[in-house]
Amino acid sequence: MVVSETLLEIRDYIGDGYKPIIDYGAWRVAILRYHPELEPDQITAMQRHDETDEVFVLLAGRCILFLGEGAAEVTAIHAVDMEPLKAYNIKRGVWHNHTLDRDAMVLIVENQDTTKENSPFTDINADQRAYLVQSKNTIWG
């Protein structure tokens, strides 16, 4: 049975990385899946959103959220192993990044106007990069 999109919009995403799937008014729903650039040894920076919180919900697989303390730069990093079907609200202005296993699917809810212009990146140093790799190895074995 086919239902008109005036009644119901159905979207999915099976590619790699981040993909917005529904925008409406002030909010956006996106899907995040595995991408090689999200392997801990490939992560060189963290991002923050200056105008919005960002909600992550792990739907499948595994995902570690990396949360950074600090204002202009990251001074300390915390690794949080996400549990399926729990909502993780990363507060506005918090540095973050993530790593996913190949089976992971994460639902993201954020402001529709979240862009590179209001979401700066900052580089992390070699010790912090090593911490990301060590955290993944320790948490996932």
Image (cartoon, rainbow, N blue to C red):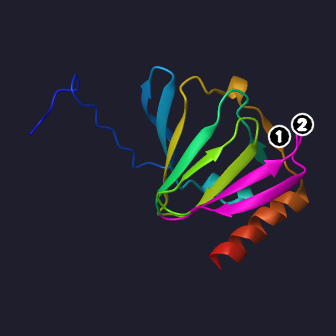
Residue ID for mark 1: 122
Query: Which image quadrant for residue 3?
Result: top left
Vertical relation: 120 (above or below) 55: above
Q: From this viewpoint, is residue 133 visible? A: yes
Query: Which image quadrant for residue 71?
Result: top right
Residue ID for mark 2: 72
Within 10 Å of disc 1 (Cα), the crowding (few <14, some 14-19, many 20+) is some
Q: From this viewpoint, is residue 43 visible? A: no
Q: Is residue 25 left or right of residue 43?
A: left
Report x, y in % for residue 129.
82, 59
Quarter of the image for the N terminus: give it.
top left
Report x, y in % for residue 116.
68, 28
Vertical relation: 32 (above or below) 127: above
Range of magenta residues = 61-82
Outermost residue, left side: 1
Magenta stretch: residue 71 in it? yes
* Amino acid type shown at disc 2: Ala
Report x, y in % for residue 13.
39, 45
Outermost residue, bottom side: 141
Report x, y in % for residue 42.
72, 56
Image marks 2 and 1: residues in contact by CB distance under 8 Å: yes
Vertical relation: 42 (above or below) 119: below
* Amino acid type shown at disc 1: Thr
